Image: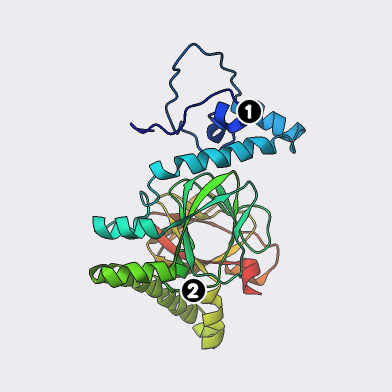
Amino acid sequence: RGKANIIRLSSDKRSWHSWWGMLEVCGTCVEQTCTVIAEMDCVIWVLQSKHSEELRLTFPRECNLFDKISARHLQLLTPHMDAMRSIAMFADCGKDFLEMLNSEFSQRICGRDEVIFRESEVGDEMFVLALGKCKVLRSGNDHPVSRLHPGSVFGGQAVLGISQTRKETVMADTVSDVRALSRKALLRVLEKFPEEEERILSIVEAHSQSRKAASMALEQASASEGGFSQDFTRMLVDNMFEQPFMVNQAILTQGTPGTHLVVLVHGIVEIEANGMVVATVTAPGIFGERGLLVTGSRSGATVRCTTVAECMMLPVDGAS
């Protein structure tokens, strides 16, 4: 990998010594992780991804060997990978700070279908997906609400001290290399780099502003009916999670089941009914409340972003 020699492959009795490419075949990564060069004339047997998937369906127990080899290869790659390469929240921090922070991450090799953390659990770690794929589940639903890919960061609220209660379940879809950073480790690094603390505090403040905006929008929406109590509003916001949306992305789609109450915190959206734009809404705004009140109801309109939008989302089941 680069100019570093990681392993010399050979046909000895240790299966992982004669195999390479299992990370790609088993879906942990798409691009080749290393260059493999023949040092002498060789006979090579090739297994393609589609055939690996077929084998896994027919021989699931036997194919566990593939995952074991993948896990071993991940361990070999660890010294040659930078877990910090895609963490947006630390993007503007200094090089020395990042190097020390990187040394505080611990590695966790997760097997296929292994749970990294569960919804409603309490924790103080954030995670970076270095290699692999994970799925995000909420409210006991087996259908993923999103999928995570290399470079994804999750659990950030816990390490920043915003909320220790997990808002979702994260499970490995493939053998995955996950790096963990505890709040204690982050504070230890900040002690040596106090100038970086302002950057971290600004992230916490941004999240606090989103919570405040969501609370204000809920209070305004309920004012005509006498208003929500502070405790009820706080309960709703505590169960929400932040979700950004891009330009032209639909937040809600007409005719689909209502699964979330949506509070538009920042941005502008258009409301479409039967393909026609009927209104433009600038934040703050609330959508999808019918799904919260009427079980099984469907969205009456499409809500589409005209700018990048930041929303606070409440799963319908999460309000119970």
Q: Report the label total.
A: 2
Q: In screen coordinates, is 300 left or right of 213?
A: right
Which residue lies at the image location 53% right of the left edge and 81% below the top edge? 233
Residue 19 coordinates in the image, percent (x, y): 57, 28
Farthest top residue in view = 41
Q: Is residue 70 above or below residue 96?
A: above
Q: Quadrant of the C terminus?
A: bottom right
Residue 157 coordinates in the image, percent (x, y): 45, 68
Sequence-first disc among 1 and 2: 1
Q: Is residue 136 above or below residue 76?
A: below
Q: Is residue 96 visible?
A: yes
Q: Which label belongs to residue 13?
A: 1
Q: Is residue 69 above or below residue 210?
A: above
Which residue lies at the image location 56% right of the left edge and 83% below the top edge? 232
Farthest front residue in view = 12
Q: Quadrant of the N terminus?
A: top left
Q: Which label belongs to residue 163?
A: 2
| Residue type at numbered disc 1 | Lys
Residue 87 coordinates in the image, percent (x, y): 37, 54
Q: Nearer the viewer, mark 1 or mark 2?
A: 1
Q: Are dots 1 and 2 in contact, CB under 8 Å?
A: no
Observer-nearest residue: 163 or 174?
174
Q: Which label belongs to residue 70?
A: none
Residue 209 appears in which quarter of the rendering?
bottom left
Measure the C-alpha gap from mark 1 to mark 2: 49 Å
Which residue lies at the image location 76% right of the left edge and 33% below the top edge? 59
